[in-house]
Amino acid sequence: MKQYYIVSLKHTSKGDAALLFWGHDGGGYSWHRDRAGLYNDDVVQKHTSCDNVKVLKEDVDPFWMNALDFNDKYISVPNNKTVLHHLGLLESEKFMKPKKFASCRMVFINTPVQH
């Protein structure tokens, strides 16, 4: 059975350093892989829209990177044109909030991600 993450474009700003995912069981949103929810076909069909986009887990997994935000460690997906392109979200970027609303300022570090 396929698994998906749901990217919340509505809650991600064009200026955020990372993409924001739906949390476990629809409980909030998170930049952190450990708190990002995985959903099956039935759930994503009910909840996807132009600003809540399903993305296959296998497509997202190569982009998880270690990051720091105020010395807190995260494993997140960068919000950049390359990642958006590979996840099929480049056209969906228009549904993101403007840069001035950015709240995610984490810094990505080039170290291997623990799986």
Image (tube, helix red, strand yellow):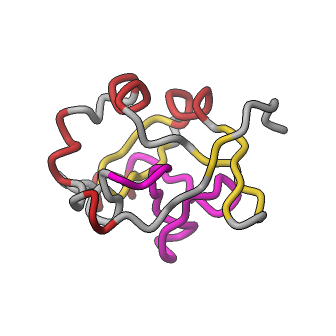
Q: Is residue 46 visible?
A: no
Q: Is residue 23 magenta?
A: yes
Q: Where is residue 72 drawn, in percent x and y? A: 76, 65
Quadrant where the N terminus sits is top right
Picture residue at 70% right of the left edge, 67% below the top: 70
Picture residue at 81% right of the left edge, 30% below the top: 112
Highlighted magenta segment, given as a residue range: 15-41
Q: Where is residue 101 drawn, in percent x and y? A: 30, 68
Position of residue 71 in the picture relative to residue 54 (left or right)? right
Picture residue at 46% right of the left edge, 35% below the top: 56
Front-lying residue, 78 or 41: 78
Front-lying residue, 115 or 99: 99
Quadrant where the C terminus sits is top right
Q: Residue 98 appears in which quarter of the rendering? A: bottom left
Position of residue 75 in the picture relative to residue 16 (left or right)? right
Picture residue at 71% right of the left edge, 55% below the top: 68
Front-lying residue, 70 or 43: 70
Image: 66 above or below 63? below
Front-lying residue, 2 or 105: 105
Q: Where is residue 47 drawn, in percent x and y? A: 29, 61
Q: Where is residue 108 drawn, in percent x and y? A: 65, 42
